[in-house]
Image: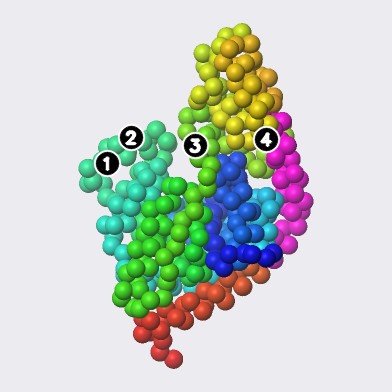
Amino acid sequence: MTNKQAKNVLTGDRPTGHLHLGHYVGSILNRVRLQDEYQKSFYMIADVQALTDNTDNPEKVRSNVIEVALDNLACGVDPLKTTFFIQSAVPEIAELATFFMNLVSVSELAQNPTIKTEMMQKGFVLNHEIENFEEIKKTATENQIKVQNVSAGFLTYPVSQASDILIFKGEIIPVGEDQLPVVELTNDIVKRFNATYGDLFSIVSPLVSGTTRLSGIDGKAKMSKSLNNAIFLSDSRDLIEEKVMKMYTDPTHLRVSDPGKVEGNIVFEFLDIFDPKKEEVEALKLEYKKGGLGDVSIKNRLASVLNEIIDPIRERRENLAKDPKAIMKILEEGTMLARETARETLTLVRRALKIDYF
Ligand code: TRP
């Protein structure tokens, strides 16, 4: 393709589960577009990062490497345009992270908003004497997780992520909004490294997709695997219908003839995002507000809209899944290519740090 911008795009997923519609609108569609707009795109399967909070479950991380690869491939992330690779198979990333560790303080990691939020969600605490321990314990009990002291691996994953990005000279970093403080830390590392050892790295730009984070089918929170409110790209037609039928609408809309609320009604939120026929959706909203339009009828519409999007993805996914060796080959070839770039960067870093002995 001509007219591609001469910048590197780098993004990744933690392989902890199948990807869902939230990932699709929030990141995968973006990747499919960006791989045509920029000269080089890297897609990393962040298994090392996944192990920081799935430390006792390596089997889960291992089995989901291929699942997230399948999800991305089925949606059109193209290995001819995007270099797919596995984080752990590029050990240079870990080496660079070791050097970056010296440029970041423990307290700034503990205060990083992304880390703070995730520690809260996962029941990780710095130590049991901290002031909001009771609050953390309460949230953890509600979510049926145990409270434990945070590992150095988890606390420092933003440093490792800075290394993911900078070792490949990533410049455009598509991430979810929740990851912005991690990208900010990457830029702090760039400035500190350059000031200490000489100019080597460039400032990176996060790219947050235009779509706000998709709600889960329960309407209570954003779509997430762990909250059990997700529609997966690998779900069957029937399962998607079943999930749409369970979707949160307007609890006061009891009879078809009752006037209904559109705001906060998840079915309409989804129709706004996924239904290509915007005018029809607007007309349906008016009818719903007036009364006379039943939930089942809008849900039937949504189920078929979603299946129209997911049918071809599911079909491609099933076909690709028949040949797991071919998928592993894509990952292996991509990893070899990515590693060349990583090695080049590390050579420059070793020289800058004066540890290039032989
Ligand atoms: N932390 C990211 C997430 O949870 C995944 C990730 C790992 C990543 N390394 C990255 C994203 C580098 C962008 C760039 O979604």
Q: Is residue 270 left or right of residue 141?
A: right
> Magenta-highlighted stretch: main secondary structure?
helix
Identify the residue under disc 1: 133
The amino acid type, in three-letter code, at marker 1 is Phe
Q: Which of marks 4 and 2 is in front?
A: 4
Helix, strand or loop at disc 4?
A: loop
Q: Nearer the viewer, mark 1 or mark 3?
A: 3
Identify the residue under disc 2: 138
The amino acid type, in three-letter code, at marker 2 is Lys
- The spot of residue 13 in percent (x, y) is 54, 54
In the image, farthest residue toward the bottom? 358
Of the numbered discs in the image, which one, if any, rests on residue 222? 3
Disc 2, ligand 1: is the CB inside 8 Å? no
The amino acid type, in three-letter code, at marker 3 is Lys
The amino acid type, in three-letter code, at marker 4 is Pro
What is the C-alpha distance between the residues marked 1 and 3?
A: 25 Å
Q: Is residue 114 left or right of residue 288?
A: left
Helix, strand or loop at disc 3?
A: loop
Identify the residue under disc 4: 276
